Amino acid sequence: MPLFSDHPASVGETYWQHMRSAFGFGGCMIAGGVACLAHGLLPFLFTSTGSRTVAELHDRMITHRSRVKPLNQSASVDVACLDR
């Protein structure tokens, strides 16, 4: 069904690969957001987590774009988040 497959195909992924990648990004965004909220209340906590999360997600997205392969080849997806 094009509604579910057009966008994932445009970035070289199947529906399931794209879901996994999007869930990974979403989880990292949620974790970074919670860290930012905690930092707002307790400024001595998570002093660089929000900015680091944004930078890491940006790097992952740009790196993935340069690795996009046709759908008949497997595309690897890094789901690591906040590992530093």
Image (cartoon, rainbow, N blue to C red):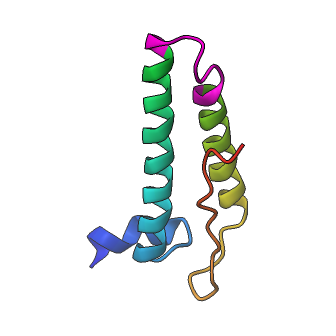
User: Image quadrant of residue 43?
Assistant: top right
Please say whether residue 42 is one of the residues in the magenta stretch.
Answer: yes
In terms of depth relative to the viewer, which is nearer, 13 or 10? 13
In this view, the residue in front, 13 or 77, is 77
Judge whether 44 appears above or below 11 on screen. above
- Asked whether, in this view, residue 62 is left or right of residue 1, the answer is right
Task: Residue 37: give x, y in percent of width and height.
Answer: 42, 21
**Residue at the image point whose x is 72% and y is 55% from the top:** 63
Question: With 11 as the anchor, is 63 left or right in this view?
Answer: right
Residue 64 in picture, x, y percent from top left: 66, 60
How many numbered marks, from 0 up?
A: 0
Task: Give the image quarter of residue 33.
Answer: top left
Q: Is residue 11 above or below residue 14?
A: above
At horizontal 58% and vertical 60% (from top left) the residue drawn is: 79
Image coordinates of residue 2 in percent, x first then y, are: 30, 74
Q: Reply yes or no: does residue 33 show up in magenta.
A: no
Pick the front one: 83 or 11: 83
* Residue at the far bottom in the pictured view: 72
Residue at 43% over, 58% down? 23
Q: Residue at x 49, y 56 (%)?
A: 24
Q: Which residues are magenta?
A: 40-50
SS assignment for the magenta stretch, majority: loop
**Quadrant showing the C terminus:** top right
Q: Quadrant of the N terminus?
A: bottom left
Above or below 15: residue 50: above
Say above or below: 43 vs 84.
above
Position of residue 34 measured from the top left corner of the image (x, y, whole percent):
43, 31
